Image: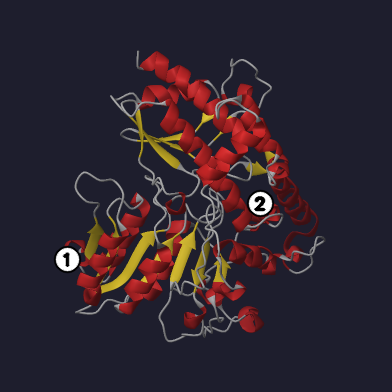
C-alpha cells in the first residue's frame, strides 16, 4: 500500500508538535522551521537591505528588512558584483580583444553560453531549446513573428482577460500587424461571474469550442495579479489536439515553480530574469523553442546576425543561415553586463534545485496562508490566490476591504516590509524560498495585525 504525500498544512502541524511551540505565531515555531530549513544557507548569498535603508528612522535600523517582492524584483545575489566587476576589469584591460581572449574564460563572443545550461534546468528544457536574449516583450514579439501565422479560417489568439498589459499590447499589435482586427481575432478568457480565478475546465471548453479558429494559445504560467498557477501541461495538450500552437509567458513562473517545457511539449515560451531569477532591473530575458521546431528553417522569423551559423557569422556574407534550436532566433550580441549579472544569480540556483525550492515554498507560503486565514477576519482581507498549493507559486494576493489597501501598504513600507500593490485593492506578498525565512513571515503577520487594528478600528 502506498501512502499519499502529506499536505503542507499537515507538515506544518507535525512541525508545530515537534517544535514545542504553543502556536504557529510563536517565535519559537518560526525559529524551529528556520533551523530545519535545508536551504537556509542560501540566504547568505544575497544582499538584504536593512530596515534603516528601506525606512529611514525605523527602529532596529541594523536589522534586515522583510522583503516579499521577489515577484517584482529579486534581491541582489552577492555573486553578481563579482561577475560584473570581472567584466568591467576585462573590458578595461582588453577592450575589443575580450570578445575572444578573456582572463576568466568567458569570451564575449560566447557569453550567452555561460547561462544557457542552468537556465534550461530552471525551465525544464534541453540546453539547445533555450536562448538568453533581449527583454521579455521583445522576445514575445520575436516568437509571435515566427509562430503566429494566421489564415482565413485560423487567425484567433486566446489569452487570459487580465493578462499583464504588456502581453496584451503585444498580442493586439501582432494581430494588427497581419491586417486583422483584435475585435475579431482576440479571445480573452474571462472568469465566471463573481469569480476572480480562471477555471481550467472553462479554458478547455473555450479551446474545444473555438480551437479550429485559434492559431495561438498564449497564457502566463502564473497570473501576475492573482498568483494563479495555470495547469500548463493540461492546457497545452488540449490546445495542440485542436491544432493550436501553444506559448507561455513565464515571467512569474521561471525560478518560482518547477516547469517542464520540453516534457509538456510546449511550442514556445519566454521569461524575464529580474523577478525570481534575481538578475537585476531590466535584466536579460530568455526564450524556449521546442526541439521539434529547432530545425524548421522554413518557418519565417525575425533574423539577426547572432542567430546565424557561428562558423560563418563573421564572414559577413548576407545569406542568413540560422543555427538549429532556440539560438537561431537570436538577433544581436547580448549585453555582457546583464548576462554576467544573470550568471551571478544562476550560480546560486546551481546550489539547489527547483524541486527543493518548491518543497520549501510549499511550507513557507503555506505558513503565510495559514496565519492570514486564522489571524484575520474575512471582513478585513481576502486571499484571492488559490488555496490549493499546487495551483500557486510563492505569491499570495491579498485584497484589503473598505478601501484600506493603500493605507496598509504605506504602513507596511514605514515598517520596512516590502511587498507591492496592484490597484485597486491588492497587495502581493511573495516569500521567495531562496532568501525568505519563516521568521520573516511571522514578523510580517504580527506587524500586519498591529496595522489592521489601527486602520480598521
The answer to whether any part of residue 179 appears in the image is no
Residue drawn 30% across the image and 50% down it: 162
Q: Measured from the top left, where is residue 298 in percent x and y?
A: 42, 87
- Give the numbered dot on residue 103: none
Q: Nearer the viewer, residue 110 or 438?
A: 438
Residue carrying label 2: 345
Q: Measured from the top left, where is residue 214 in percent x and y?
A: 26, 72
Q: Residue furthest left?
A: 184
Residue drawn 38% across the image and 67% down it: 234
Left or right: residue 270 compared with residue 360? left
Secondary element under disc 1, as helix, strand or loop, is: helix
Left or right: residue 26 compared with residue 228? right
Q: Split into 4 quadrants, where in the image is the C terminus?
A: top left
- Give the numbered dot on residue 184: 1
Q: Nearer the viewer, residue 289 or 448?
A: 448
Q: Residue furthest right?
A: 103
Q: Measured from the top left, where is residue 198 in percent x and y?
A: 30, 53
Secondary element under disc 2, as helix, strand or loop, is: helix
> In this rendering, is residue 37 above or below 416?
below
User: Crowding at label 2, few (<14), some or many (≥20) Cα neighbours within 10 Å?
Assistant: many
Amino acid at each position: 500500500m502506498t501512502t499519499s504525500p502529506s499536505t503542507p498544512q499537515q507538515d506544518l502541524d507535525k512541525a508545530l508538535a515537534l517544535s514545542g511551540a504553543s502556536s504557529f505565531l510563536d517565535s519559537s515555531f518560526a525559529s524551529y522551521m528556520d533551523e530545519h530549513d535545508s536551504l537556509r544557507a542560501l540566504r547568505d548569498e544575497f544582499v538584504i537591505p536593512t530596515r534603516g535603508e528601506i525606512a529611514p528612522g525605523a527602529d532596529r535600523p541594523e536589522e534586515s528588512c522583510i522583503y516579499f517582492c521577489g515577484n517584482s524584483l529579486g534581491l541582489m545575489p552577492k555573486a553578481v558584483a563579482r561577475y560584473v566587476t570581472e567584466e568591467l576589469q576585462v573590458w578595461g584591460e582588453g577592450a575589443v580583444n575580450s570578445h575572444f581572449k578573456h582572463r576568466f574564460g568567458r569570451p564575449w563572443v560566447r557569453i550567452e553560453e555561460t547561462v544557457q545550461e542552468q537556465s534550461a534546468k530552471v525551465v525544464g528544457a534541453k540546453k539547445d531549446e533555450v536562448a538568453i536574449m533581449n527583454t521579455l516583450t521583445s522576445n514575445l514579439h520575436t516568437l509571435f513573428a515566427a509562430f503566429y501565422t494566421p489564415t482565413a479560417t485560423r487567425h484567433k489568439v486566446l489569452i487570459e482577460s487580465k493578462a499583464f498589459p504588456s502581453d496584451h499590447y503585444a498580442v493586439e499589435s501582432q494581430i494588427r500587424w497581419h491586417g486583422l482586427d483584435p475585435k475579431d481575432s482576440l479571445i480573452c478568457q474571462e472568469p465566471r461571474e463573481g469569480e476572480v480565478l480562471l477555471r481550467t475546465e472553462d479554458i478547455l471548453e473555450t479551446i474545444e469550442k473555438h480551437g479550429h479558429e485559434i492559431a495561438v494559445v498564449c497564457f502566463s504560467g502564473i497570473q501576475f495579479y492573482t498568483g494563479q498557477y495555470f495547469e500548463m501541461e493540461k492546457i497545452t495538450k488540449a490546445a495542440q489536439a485542436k491544432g493550436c500552437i501553444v506559448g507561455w509567458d513565464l515571467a512569474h513562473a521561471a525560478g518560482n515553480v518547477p516547469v517542464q517545457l520540453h516534457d509538456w511539449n510546449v511550442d514556445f515560451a519566454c521569461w524575464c530574469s529580474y523577478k525570481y531569477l534575481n538578475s537585476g532591473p531590466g535584466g536579460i530575458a530568455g526564450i524556449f523553442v521546442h526541439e521539434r521546431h529547432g530545425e524548421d528553417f522554413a518557418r519565417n522569423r525575425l533574423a539577426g546576425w547572432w542567430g546565424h551559423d557561428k562558423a560563418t557569422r563573421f564572414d559577413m556574407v548576407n545569406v542568413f543561415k540560422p543555427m538549429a534550436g532556440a539560438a537561431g532566433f537570436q538577433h544581436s550580441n547580448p549585453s555582457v553586463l546583464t548576462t554576467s549579472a544573470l550568471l551571478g544569480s544562476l550560480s546560486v540556483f546551481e546550489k539547489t534545485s527547483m524541486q527543493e525550492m518548491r518543497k520549501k515554498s510549499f511550507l513557507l507560503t503555506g505558513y503565510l496562508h495559514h496565519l492570514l486565514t486564522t489571524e484575520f477576519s474575512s471582513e478585513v482581507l481576502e486571499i484571492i490566490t488559490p488555496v490549493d498549493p499546487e495551483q500557486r507559486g510563492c505569491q499570495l494576493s491579498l485584497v484589503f476591504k473598505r478601501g484600506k489597501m493603500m493605507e496598509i501598504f504605506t504602513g507596511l513600507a514605514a515598517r520596512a516590509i516590502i511587498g507591492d500593490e496592484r490597484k485597486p485593492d491588492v497587495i502581493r506578498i511573495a516569500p521567495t524560498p531562496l532568501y525568505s525565512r519563516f521568521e520573516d513571515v511571522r514578523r510580517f503577520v504580527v506587524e500586519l495585525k498591529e496595522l489592521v487594528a489601527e486602520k480598521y478600528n
